[in-house]
Amino acid sequence: MSNATVEQQLLDLEHARGRALVEEDYPRVTELFADDLVYVHTTGLVQGKADYLDYAQSAVQYLAIERGDLQVRFYGDDLAIMTGPQCNTLQKRGGDQPIRGEGFATQVWVHGAQGWQISSFHATRSPS
């Protein structure tokens, strides 16, 4: 496959990740993250896959996930780095105040037996 084709596939998967989190489709979220996931939140909290999935299901509710222009760079056939702006709107479970967080995210996508998955996700907040 050409890099342009794979890039579109990754952009579609990233869109699917956002949609799955908002729709609380956790089986789909599970498929999109590699078992060795390292997820770094804008707060500095670092979680593995199981802890992140538990956090997404029990601590917060994603109301919207917006991504700006994303850049995808390839390193061989099985590794891609995706970078770009992100804005999450979420609220704490049981809370009533939405929180909007704007920032920048770097994702490491790896291609393996399960297809393309995110192995590392690191988000930072935009300066206020």
Image (spheres, grey):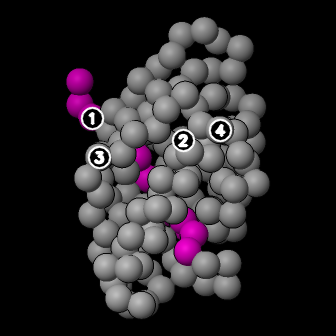
Residue hosting label 1: 126
Earlier sequence position, callout 1 versus callout 2 = 2
In this rendering, the label closer to the viewer, 2 or 3: 3
Residue hosting label 4: 23
Question: Mark 1 to mark 2: distance in Å?
Answer: 17 Å
> Considering the numbered disc 3 on the image, is that residue within a helix, a strand or a loop?
loop
Marking on residue 68: 3
Q: Does residue 127 show up magenta in the picture?
A: yes
Q: Residues within 10 Å of mark 1 (few under 14, many from 20)?
A: few
Marking on residue 45: 2
Question: Mark 2 to mark 4: distance in Å?
Answer: 23 Å
Question: Mark 3 to mark 1: distance in Å?
Answer: 13 Å
From the top left corner, tell me how far across and down residue 55 is, in percent: 69, 38
Q: Nearer the viewer, residue 100 or 15?
A: 15
At label 2, the amino acid type is: Leu
Q: Nearer the viewer, residue 102 or 26?
A: 26
Earlier sequence position, callout 2 versus callout 3 = 2
> Considering the numbered disc 4 on the image, is that residue within a helix, a strand or a loop?
loop
Q: Mostly what secondary structure, the magenta segment?
A: strand
